[in-house]
Image (cartoon, helix red, strand yellow):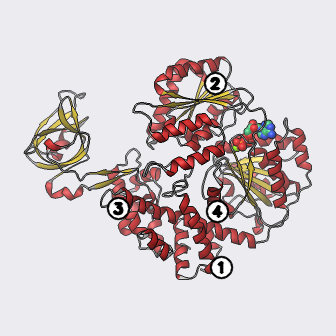
Amino acid sequence: MRPEILFSLFAPVTTLPGVGPRMAEKFAKVAGERVLDVLWLRPAGYVDRRLRPSIVSVPEGSVATLALNVLAHQTPPHPKVPYRVICSDDTSAIELVFFGGRNDYLSRLLPEGSRRIVSGRVERHDGRLQMAHPDYAVAPDQADQIPEIEPVYPLTEGLTNKAVAKAARGGLLNAPDLPEWQDAAWLAKQRWASWRSSLTAIHAPPHVDEAALEVARRRLAYDEVLANQLALMLIRARMKKAAGRVVDGSGALRAKLLAALPFKPTGAQTRAVREIAADLKTGERMLRLLQGDVGAGKTLVALMAMLIAVETGAQAALMAPTEILARQHMATIGPLAAQIGIRAEVLTGREKGKARTALLADLAAGKIQILIGTHALFTEDVAFEDLALAVVDEQHKFGVSQRMSLSGRGGRPTHVLVMTATPIPRTLSMTIYGDMDVSKLDEKPPGRQPIATRAVPLNRLEEVENAVARAIQSGDRVFWVCPLVEQNEKLDVTAVESRFRELERRFGDKVALAHGKMKAAQKDEAMERFRSGAASVLVATTVIEVGVDVPEATVMIVEHAERFGLAQLHQLRGRVGRGSRASSCLLLYQDDPPLGETAKARLKIMRETEDGFVIAEEDLKLRGAGELLGTKQAGTPDLHYADLFRDADLLSVARDDAMLAVGRDAELTSTRGEALRALLYLFERDEAVRYLRSG
Ligand code: ADP
Ligand code: MG
């Protein structure tokens, strides 16, 4: 049971000032449904409104707060011309400019002859000083409504920055003072403030002091990694104690599978299967990480591992992070399973009604040996007859601990194999996954050709389209990936759709489109057309995880490659070069304004190497020096304030800290122990708390 002190944090966002049911839907899009989700929102930057110059001395291009006399309104002669409000102070004049401004509204906001405090960005246009759409315009006695420092939040249509800021401040005001869970000496050494003060420093900073913001962020990041370490440790300890089960297959199904395969497993695949088989028969519960670059052949290892369980008469499950990937696994595994005489099925949120009921009945009766699906596999109504092994294809998702707590029917322990395509350095994998055993696929299947990688400025788009034309001519298939724009779903869709239309104009129905906002059926259809070759070009956002296996795809085009992190670029490139034909990767970048140093370095690394482990090390270096409050890079989607790369030093401290804390107080009943329990609940590691005897 979650402690009462946390209730207000887990309350719905509608308990926040200014948030009604309709606004709550907007919040659900950018943050979540609870107060805590709003507090976890990390500002992408800050606007400083403290500059209060006279008009003559205002620096052009900067955000300023001005005390103005409203002189006159100039209503536009026709709708294309903006609405202007002429203002002045003792030194000069400035125009406030509104596009599509409404008369009545603007005369109420800025009555002629009144004084107004106005804040926004000042620019010069056609020689005239202007402020377009001021962020604030208030009467002098309301001046305190204008914050001196304003965090900038990710937004969605219908949700203003002001609304988010207000909600976050309201949430903080009501936030409880939680017991301090950090070690007192460590806290003092780092000069960290309390959890609540640190969050306040982020959402309502008294001034923009990058160093102070970073101190606050680090405290919150540490909380996060400490919670994770502690959860991993508690669950691991409990798993070690719990009896395992001996799973020792005859090898018959594995032999059949190998005979049915058109290729031979690589040495690395064989080694990994051998390591897994050895784990499964020790009698202890297996917890193993299978690390392998994109295309290294993890699926075969997973299938072989699952067959070991099936050989003993038990069942196995494979959980994928997305529906598309689950179906992809099914497409690969289903026919092989049928060939060797066992039954594999797929279960996602889309299986409904009678079909679902029948499938669940067969699963409970043990008539299905392998079940593939999304997290829907582990919902309440899914009961296996006897689940011996769960394989989690988790890409780069964080929060393994939840998945570790899986158990079979009647509480029989389930062995767990986690597969990851992120070749993270060992130091990091230790801290993310705890002391899991690791198998590495460090050898690619034979016959792979190197992928020729080039960086091309976006103004040479036509050349790129010509290359696409040639590829289509010669029967190749092309991925065209459009990036996320400003964390704004609507704009993203616009970008990907307009690229699609442009390519469609030239290449007709050879082009297919897939993005996250499409209906699942439409999306599947597009993917299927691309897979079958009916379409030669797939225009997509990364939202849909281009995790599809299409060996015929030989060209990967990434638009605005400068906006992607290294890990992501590497993942994307790995989608080609899977067959025996020569492949290429074009990284299109915007060079106006010129590329920053980090972006340049990323593109250079991509051109120089294809080795995921090398790329991961370089990534670590680049991110370590990365921007202070830049947008979070892909790779750690479940973390709010921590960045696995920038906070690598904190990870190992947290590990030792958690180990010591549990060593001294295994059941977390001391004063610090109680506080640590609150921490675990705060980060929703409830399952870890359940493993403690008392409380
Ligand atoms: P990933 O590790 O990215 O999940 P997959 O398991 O999807 O990689 O394998 C990538 C491709 O390589 C698939 O088309 C698969 O059939 C093929 N493959 C896997 N192992 C081998 C092998 N030993 N020899 C040749 N091809 C292989
Ligand atoms: Mg895979």
Q: Is mark 3 within 8 Å of ligand 2?
A: no
The Cα atoms of the two marked residues, 4 and 1, are separated by: 18 Å
The answer to whether the residues at label 2 and label 1 have Cβ atoms under 8 Å apart is: no
Residue 330 appears in view: no
Q: Residues within 10 Å of mark 4 (few under 14, many from 20)?
A: many
- Residue type, label 4: Ser
- Residue type, label 3: Arg
Give the structural element (helix, strand or loop) at label 3: helix
Coordinates of residue 411 in the picture (x, y in percent): 75, 68
- Residue type, label 2: Ser
Coordinates of residue 145 in the picture (x, y in percent): 23, 57
Give the structural element (helix, strand or loop) at label 2: loop
The answer to whether the residues at label 4 and label 3 have Cβ atoms under 8 Å apart is: no
* Residue appearing at x 69%, y 54% in the figure: 377
Pointer 1: what residue? 693
| Comes first in the chain, label 4 or label 3 | 3
Pointer 2: what residue? 536
Coordinates of residue 156 in the picture (x, y in percent): 41, 46
Using the image, determine if residue 437 lies above or below residue 60. below
Pointer 4: what residue? 401
Using the image, determine if residue 71 lies above or below residue 585. below
Residue 72: image quadrant is top left
281 relative position to 204: left or right: right
| Comes first in the chain, label 2 or label 1 | 2
Q: Residues within 10 Å of mark 3 (few under 14, many from 20)?
A: many
Coordinates of residue 9 in the picture (x, y in percent): 45, 66
Position of the N terminus, as image quadrant, is: bottom right
Pointer 3: what residue? 169
